[in-house]
Image (cartoon, coloured by chain):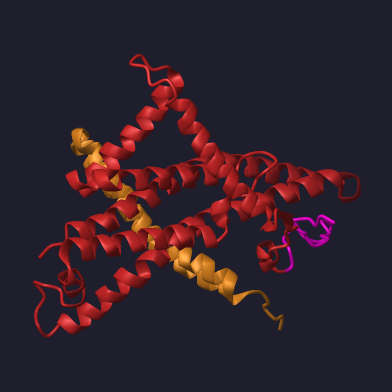
Amino acid sequence: MEELSGAIALIGYGLATLGPGIGIGIIAGNSVQAMARQPEAAGMVRTAMFMGIAFTEALALIAFVLFFLT
Amino acid sequence: MEELILAAAPCDLSESAVCAPANVNELFEFRETVYFVFGLPITRTVFLIFLVAAFAIALFYFGLRKRSTQPGKFQLAIESLMTFVRDDIAIGIIGPTGIKYYPYLLSLLIFILIGNVFKITPFINLPVTARMAIPLFLALLTWVIFVFAGFKRNGFSYFLGIVWPPGVPAALKPLVGVIEFFSTFFVRPFSLAVRLFANLVAGHVMLTLLLTTAFVSFATIGEIGLVKGAFGFAWWALGLSIFMFEIIVIILQAYIFTLLSAVYINTSVNAEH
């Protein structure tokens, strides 16, 4: 039997990217749909999209920082 | 004696494909030379902060020196940036009272933008916003502003509106209140700072590892052979394409930090009661 070696924090970071990844995909996809349906509201939708992405992304970034801290 | 900022561990490319340091924490050690100027300790980061400030002042001084009614290209660029912050961020998010916070938001955007641009500036290659102290300070500044704005506008009912939220069933109020209290006063500044910091550090580490690996494999191409040297070329190409990607990150993160500051100020200025 060979032993596995490496940082377990890497696995944790990988897991932590799943949720935000899906979330950002949903946000961006729905924003594109909204912009395509109503191009005149594109500016408003874009601002809301960036805000949503920023909030969702924070979880992955906190995991990224914790990966370095551990 | 001047020490190297990034003291990469000696790495053997005949064994591993990527030139990663044994311990990533090495990248975050402050091995900076301290110069004493008039008794003040000045490191590279401190020097870069002053450089950012000098650039920001120069930008506005030279951009708005003439203020002609037929603006040149430079003046037009500065003015459209200012109009964007005023109309889309300050007034667009906060409402008519947002004009009061417009100078703060504009200086925030410019400081973070120039600080971020240092990440891809040749010969500097160090974003000042990738030192945790700076995003944390900026986030705490936003925190102080939105808490003060809330108390000044609504008095003690601002605090009451957070810990005893209206429109929530009475049985849930203590639970929601505790969650809201923590998310407003602790999670907000923390996530604001960590978002900027982690985005820039991630790009910085990626660029450092890729381009250092490429450089080492180019320099030792005689020893490791052409096949592994070709891998070095791939790392180099990837590093350069990430350079392009980082330009987007730089602009977007400066924008998002400013936008979220405006959103937080908005929640305390226009609190629902």
Q: Residue furthest right?
A: B223
Instruction: Decide: is B180 above or below B131.
Output: below
Residue B270: horizontal and vertical position, in percent?
Answer: 17, 57
Could one spot residue B240 in this view of the protein? Answer: yes
Residue B219: horizontal and vertical position, in percent?
Answer: 85, 45
Foreground pick, B256 / A8: B256
Q: Which chain is orange?
A: A
Q: Quadrant of residue A41?
A: top left
- Whether the magenta-drawn stretch holds residue B17 is answered as yes
Foreground pick, B57 / B221: B57
Foreground pick, B178 / B273: B273
The chief SS type of the magenta part is: loop
Instruction: Decide: is B185 above or below B127.
Output: below
B124 relative to B101 in the view: left or right: right
Rendered hue of chain B is red
Q: Residue at x 23, y 42 (%)?
A: B91
For the C terminus of chain A, the quadrant is: bottom right
Q: Quadrant of residue B152?
A: bottom left
Residue B233: horizontal and vertical position, in percent?
Answer: 73, 41
How many numbered discs, if any? 0
A47 relative to B170 in the view: left or right: right
Q: Residue at x 72, y 59 (%)?
A: B32
For the N terminus of chain A, the quadrant is: bottom right
The stretch of residues the image draws in magenta is B1-22
Residue B261: horizontal and vertical position, in percent?
Answer: 34, 54
Q: Residue at x 70, y 47 (%)?
A: B211
Could one spot residue B18 in this view of the protein? Answer: no
Q: Residue at x 36, y 70 (%)?
A: B187
- Whether the magenta-drawn stretch holds residue B24 is answered as no
Foreground pick, B203 / B136: B136
B201 relative to A1 in the view: left or right: left
